[in-house]
């Protein structure tokens, strides 16, 4: 319920009647906006004395007090001036230049009067020029007035001046709208670009705000487009005064033509103002009515519908003006007549409501007729043309209603003496505060400022969220293709696809290639791929291959990323070979996708790859995914449903090709390796009486997604049994709590302390645990003095034995190598690769030379990771560019079944003859023997077959000493 703000008793019956009429007009304005009259209350008896007139006057004061605290815009006027004209004019100026009484508690912000201010500027300029008394002709006077208007910037001067410092302080005060926005924007920028750039932006913004404020208060930009200027140029009231420049000369798109109209009409107004100051009654009536018209136009504009600030919805009560006593001498009657005359000429209905009291002995009638036209002095032009010009001059005033016509906009309230004297004290008069509407709450400065500050704060928080969620997350240009996720060590990893230059998985990673590649870092390889991508011109034919691998690891041990480094090096080498070959019209673009440390986040990475492929039709497939985890099957299935083939590098999973037709493996599977090791194990079993064996496997932890060791345990157990070994219970080992070294003491004591120490051991673990195993076998009683054969998988190709393993003198290792480089061709590949990598070094630096006999034994190539990823990229590119034209991902998938790349480092890379959902037995491999595993370990290739060779290995092919 609205709050009561005023209560009083009605002194008499007339007071109650007038009060309720006024309140009804005010309160109904919100509902149907009734036409607002000029209410004039007067004692009906002309012979009533001053006491009765005082009662009528008290009614006006009472209604005024009743609405002062209601948020109704009210103004109590009292005219002062030497003449009625000056008194009436002073009241109009009071309404437009001084605050209304409810300025601080109104429904909406205070009224603005731009048209009245423009007329005030013309008056001020005219008064200044007239006071100079050195003007010789009307033309010169007009020019002087226009010059003065220019110096005033066509605005009336106010007390006090503007300066840079005041403008600056006024612009950025926190309690102002601009100040609140300024602080909020700086808060967002501080999180986006850092404090140095934010400080520079703040300084520039402060300077700009001060300049804008100073300029806009001193000189109105685009003068002809101002509302006041447009009104001056188009109002019909001035058309007769400037017939040389009609109102249609003003245009939105014609500054010069509009400016001519404005100047002409301003000069015409100034001339009339000067004449009014000289006592010309015609000019005075014109001046007063033009001032009233500007007032009413301004008030109408303050209630204009469809404004951006929703002002009409906020202002639900009309402006109310009170004249306690209206007489001819104090200008009150003249003001009422002027309002009536202007309203009678205009078609718009303005919201002004006026209540005045008139002494009983006064008559409310039109402004007395103007004096007759003066005769034409001798020497002045006469005749029809002179009469026309005189008629034009008087037209504005002559349009007013004649004296005999009733005052159409005046509502007279004759109050009888009985009504004014009849006591009515028991009638209580009450007013309530006018409610602010929902439009005020929605579109108020405070609401908009809070909403904007809230939006900016939300933007700041959202910006921080984007930075936290994505690897590159500014508000503008955010890349959603790479996200930040928790890694195995608790730190953050960047997972996904690097589609923008700012996402760099190897940034700061100084891990170097082994062997002749020493000096080339992981960061430099990633940069080189970006350089190759940038060399592909816009519109140049190309295909895009996505490499997905483990590109990040723990900050403590950069060695975790060596697999990713070596595989990415192979991808880069083939990209450089393709893009630098002149006869290849289809270039190769490479995108890197990080599956996280040990490929534990490969599903997330694959989903991002699919998103990129949907946007970029040049993506033809994926290379990599070279680690077998529990997510490998799901990742491959996702790519299958997306229509993307996978040319895998070193993933030795046995089931992927059987389950997914889009999977093309370039490495021997665990089952193929186990079959080859079985040839050695069978020979050894034949030499022994009651051969015994054991399988030692890594225990899978809660967070471990490794599938490689699980499959190695399975195929190793089956291989030993098929070879003739009696296999004891499976023995498992675990890692330390920090996920570091292997806890092999207890398992080895159990194995070596058994009644029968096994003759063979199949190690289903990871390469990082081999050194611990070897040293344990050499130092644990029961095993240290017994010849033991250890079989393991392809992971051992990355092994680097150290001094701690030199005691394992009687241990012989056999493992499968996925890259049988001794069986293949392409001998030029190694030297070409060295030269390509050497080009990445700073000028003047060189790489070491390769061994001339067996360059593939260099440490850079020995693990086979670089070679295999090179061949996988070559196979996918070959399928994507059949007939030297780029193909789609679907066409690439189909073409992979016919690819045959001869003379590759491991043989022939081909998938010909393979069928979907079946084993792809076209992989090459070597069986490698390692004796005296340690710093002086010796290794030899026992047997093997080149890639593409379908001939199965036999025992005869794999002799054992």
Image (tube, rainbow, N blue to C red):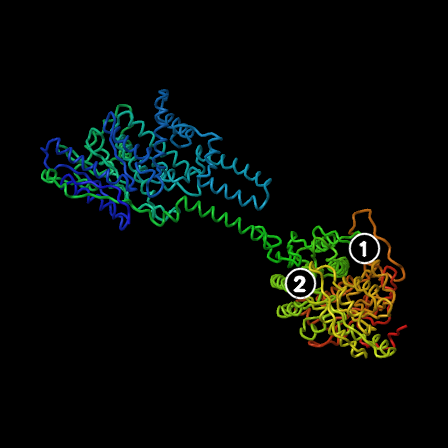
Q: From the viewer's perspective, tell me whether residue 481 is left or right of residue 937.
A: left
Quarter of the rendering occupied by the C terminus: bottom right
Marking on residue 794: none
Whether residue 883 is visible to the viewer of this picture, yes or no, is: no
At x 55%, y 44%, the residue is 189
Mark 1 nearby-residue class (10 Å; few <14, some 14–19, many ≥20): many
- Asked if residue 26 is positioned above or below residue 700 in the image, the reply reads above
Q: Earlier in the sequence, mark 1 or mark 2?
A: 1
Residue 322, image x, y percentages: 24, 36
- Asked if residue 406 is positioned above or below residue 603 in the image, the reply reads above
Tell us which disc is closer to us: 1 or 2: 2
The CA distance from mark 1 to mark 2 is: 28 Å
Q: Place residue 517 in its image quadrant.
A: bottom right
Residue 604, image x, y percentages: 62, 62
Residue 288, image x, y percentages: 27, 33
- Asked if residue 508 is positioned above or below residue 269 in the image, the reply reads below
Mark 2 nearby-residue class (10 Å; few <14, some 14–19, many ≥20): many
At x 65%, y 65%, the residue is 702
Q: From the viewer's perspective, tell me whether residue 327 is left or right of residue 523.
A: left
**Viewer-proximal residue, 694 or 40?**
694
For label 1, the residue is 517
Residue 580, image x, y percentages: 77, 57
**Viewer-proximal residue, 30 or 956?**
956
Q: Place residue 40 in its image quadrant.
A: top left
**Viewer-proximal residue, 110 or 185?**
185
- Asked if residue 285 is positioned above or below residue 831 in the image, the reply reads above
Marking on residue 600: 2
Give the secondary structure at mark 1. helix
Q: Place residue 652 in its image quadrant.
A: bottom right
Give the secondary structure at mark 2. loop
Whether residue 778 is visible to the viewer of this picture, yes or no, is: yes
């Amino acid at each position: 319920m609205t709050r009561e703000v005023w209560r009083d008793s009605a002194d008499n019956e007339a007071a109650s009647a007038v009060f309720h009429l006024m309140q009804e007009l005010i309160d109904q304005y919100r509902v149907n906006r009734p036409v607002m009259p000029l209410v004039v209350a007067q004692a009906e008896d002309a012979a009533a004395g001053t006491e009765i007139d005082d009662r009528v006057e008290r009614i006006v004061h009472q209604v005024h007090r009743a609405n002062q605290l209601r948020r109704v815009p009210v103004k109590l006027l009292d005219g002062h001036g030497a003449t009625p004209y000056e008194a009436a004019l002073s009241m109009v100026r009071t309404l437009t230049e001084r605050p209304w009484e409810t300025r601080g508690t109104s429904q909406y912000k205070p009224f603005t009067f731009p048209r009245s201010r423009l007329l005030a500027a013309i008056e001020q300029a005219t008064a200044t020029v007239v006071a100079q008394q050195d003007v010789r002709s009307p033309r010169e006077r007009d020019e002087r007035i226009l010059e003065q208007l220019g110096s005033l910037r066509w605005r009336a001067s106010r007390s006090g001046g503007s300066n840079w410092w005041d403008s600056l302080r006024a612009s950025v005060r926190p309690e102002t709208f601009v100040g609140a926005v300024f602080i909020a924007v700086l808060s967002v920028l501080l999180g986006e670009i850092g404090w140095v750039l934010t400080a520079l932006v703040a300084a520039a913004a402060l300077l700009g705000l001060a300049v804008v404020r100073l300029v806009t208060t001193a000189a109105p930009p685009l003068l002809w487009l101002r509302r006041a200027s447009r009104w001056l140029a188009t109002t019909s009231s001035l058309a007769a005064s400037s017939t040389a420049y009609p109102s249609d000369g003003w245009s939105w798109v014609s500054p010069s033509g509009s400016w001519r109209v404005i100047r002409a009409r301003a000069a015409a107004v100034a001339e009339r103002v000067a004449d009014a100051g000289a006592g010309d009654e015609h000019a005075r009536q014109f001046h007063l009515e033009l001032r009233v018209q500007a007032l009413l136009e301004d008030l109408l504009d303050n209630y204009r519908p469809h404004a951006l600030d929703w002002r009409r919805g906020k202002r639900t009560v009309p402006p109310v003006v009170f004249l306690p006593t209206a007489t001819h001498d104090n200008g009150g009657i003249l003001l009422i007549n002027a309002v009536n005359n202007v309203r009678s000429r205009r078609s718009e209905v303005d919201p002004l409501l006026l209540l005045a009291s008139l002494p009983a002995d006064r008559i409310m009638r039109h402004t007395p007729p103007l004096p007759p036209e003066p005769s034409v002095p001798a020497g002045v032009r006469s005749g029809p043309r002179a009469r026309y010009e005189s008629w034009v001059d008087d037209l504005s005033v002559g349009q007013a209603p004649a004296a005999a016509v009733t005052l159409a906009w005046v509502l007279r309230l004759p109050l009888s003496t009985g009504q004014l004297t009849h006591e009515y004290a028991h009638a209580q008069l009450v007013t309530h505060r006018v409610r602010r509407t929902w439009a005020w709450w929605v579109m108020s400065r405070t609401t908009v400022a809070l909403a904007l500050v809230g939006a900016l704060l939300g933007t700041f928080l959202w910006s921080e969220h984007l930075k936290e969620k994505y690897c590159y997350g500014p508000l503008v240009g955010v890349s959603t293709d790479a996200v930040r996720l928790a890694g195995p060590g608790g730190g953050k990893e960047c997972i996904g696809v690097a589609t923008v230059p700012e996402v760099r998985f190897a940034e700061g990673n100084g891990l170097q290639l082994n062997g002749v590649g020493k000096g080339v870092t992981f960061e430099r390889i990633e940069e080189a791929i970006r350089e190759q991508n940038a060399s592909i011109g816009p519109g140049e034919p190309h295909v895009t291959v996505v490499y997905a691998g483990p590109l990040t690891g723990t900050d403590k041990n950069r060695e975790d990323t060596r697999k990713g480094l070596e595989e990415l090096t192979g991808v880069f080498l083939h990209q450089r070979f393709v893009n630098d070959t002149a006869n290849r019209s289809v270039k190769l673009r490479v995108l890197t996708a990080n599956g996280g440390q040990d490929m534990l986040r490969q599903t997330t990475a694959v989903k991002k790859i699919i998103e990129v492929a949907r946007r970029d039709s040049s993506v033809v497939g994926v290379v990599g995914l070279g680690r077998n985890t529990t997510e490998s099957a799901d990742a491959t299935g996702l790519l299958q449903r997306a229509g993307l083939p996978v040319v895998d590098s070193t993933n030795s999973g046995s089931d992927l090709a059987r389950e997914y037709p889009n999977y093309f493996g370039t490495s021997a599977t665990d089952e193929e390796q186990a079959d080859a090791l079985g040839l050695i194990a069978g020979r050894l079993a034949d030499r022994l009486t009651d051969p015994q064996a054991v399988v030692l496997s890594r225990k899978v932890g809660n967070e471990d997604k490794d599938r490689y060791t699980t499959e190695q345990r399975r195929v190793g157990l089956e291989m030993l049994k098929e070879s003739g070994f009696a296999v004891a219970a499976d023995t498992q080992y675990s890692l330390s709590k920090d996920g570091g070294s292997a806890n092999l003491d207890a398992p080895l004591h159990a194995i070596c302390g058994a009644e029968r120490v096994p003759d063979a051991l199949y190690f289903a673990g990871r390469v990082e645990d081999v050194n611990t195993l070897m040293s344990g076998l050499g130092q644990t009683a029961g095993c240290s003095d017994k010849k033991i054969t250890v079989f393991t998988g392809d992971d051992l190709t990355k092994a680097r034995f150290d001094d701690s393993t030199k005691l394992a003198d009687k241990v012989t290792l056999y493992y499968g190598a996925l890259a049988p480089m001794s069986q293949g061709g392409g001998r030029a590949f190694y030297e070409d690769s060295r030269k390509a990598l050497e080009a990445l070094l700073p000028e003047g630096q060189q790489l070491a030379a390769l061994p001339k006999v067996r360059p593939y034994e260099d440490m850079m190539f020995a693990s086979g990771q670089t070679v295999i990823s090179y061949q996988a990229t070559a196979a996918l590119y070959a399928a994507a560019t059949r007939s030297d034209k780029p193909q789609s991902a679907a066409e690439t998938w189909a073409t992979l079944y016919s690819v045959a790349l001869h003379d590759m480092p491991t043989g022939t890379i081909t998938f010909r003859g393979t069928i979907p959902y079946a084993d792809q037995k076209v992989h090459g491999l070597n069986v490698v023997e390692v004796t005296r595993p340690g710093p002086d370990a010796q290794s030899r290739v026992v047997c093997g077959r080149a890639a593409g060779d379908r001939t199965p290995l036999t025992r005869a092919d794999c002799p054992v000493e």
